[in-house]
Image: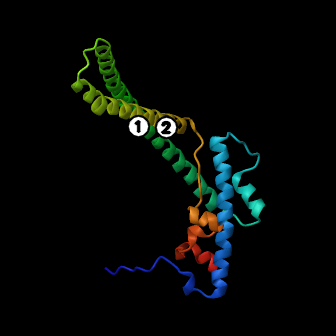
Amino acid sequence: MKVFSMLQRIYYKDLEPEAELIIKKDLKLYNCMLHKAFKICFDRAYKDVTYSEKDQRMIKSFYGTSDYFPLSAIYEAKALVKSLKCLEKENQDMIKTRLKKINKKIKTKENQLKKALKEKEKLINRSKKKKYTEEDYLYEVQVLDPNIKRLKSIIRNLKFRRNRNKFKLKRKMPSVCFGGKKNLKNGDLETFRYRIQRINEMKNCIS
């Protein structure tokens, strides 16, 4: 049995200048539609915004195109919002697990700090009763005081981490960026997703 295979990617350098311009123009238009469709789906899912018109009709009338691009953008935007919700739930579960571990560590370190402070108090009482020896002094200065300082620092950092995770847990609206920082700085948000595009998605644009 013979198997037919072909390269599924097309590079701009392999195209004629006119075909390259057509593809880039359509890609920019599609990505603008995708951003618009995602905003509509996102507002409906997280901000309880209602629209009088259908998504397809709104995007179609706004950009003045046929149904192919708006429908594709809407389906992709809905899939992005759905995956965003799943990711948000996973992140919340992960943060809750992390908070349990942090609280457990804080409790352990606070108990250790209480014991260290009790030892410190005993040494102070020994000093008041003039039973304070050189060994007691060395133990207090070289072991006990640094340990107390270290435990206080650990507890302070753990509490800061706990507050930061609590803030993340309260933040219900996730953030989305279409592209990385490099593309964002260069202002190339329209074409970054399709620098190398599959032929079967672009054959209608070339014809």
Q: Position of residue 146 (x, y in %)?
A: 33, 33
Specify the color scheme.
Answer: rainbow
From this viewpoint, is residue 7 visible? Answer: yes
Q: Position of residue 199 (x, y in %)?
A: 53, 76
Is 167 drawn above or below residue 9 in the view shown?
A: above
Is 167 drawn above or below residue 113 in the view shown?
A: below
Residue plotted at (68% across, 39% down)? 48
Camera-nearest residue between 163 and 192:
163
Kindly indicate the quadrant of the structure image that contains residue 205. Answer: bottom right
Q: Which mark is residue 74?
A: none
Residue highlighted by disc 1: 98
The 10 Å Cα crowd at callout 2, few under 14, some 14 to 19, many 20 or more, is some
Kindly indicate the quadrant of the structure image that contains residue 126. Answer: top left
Residues at badges 1 and 2 in contact (C-beta under 8 Å)?
A: yes
Q: Which mark is residue 165?
A: 2
Camera-nearest residue between 121 and 129:
129
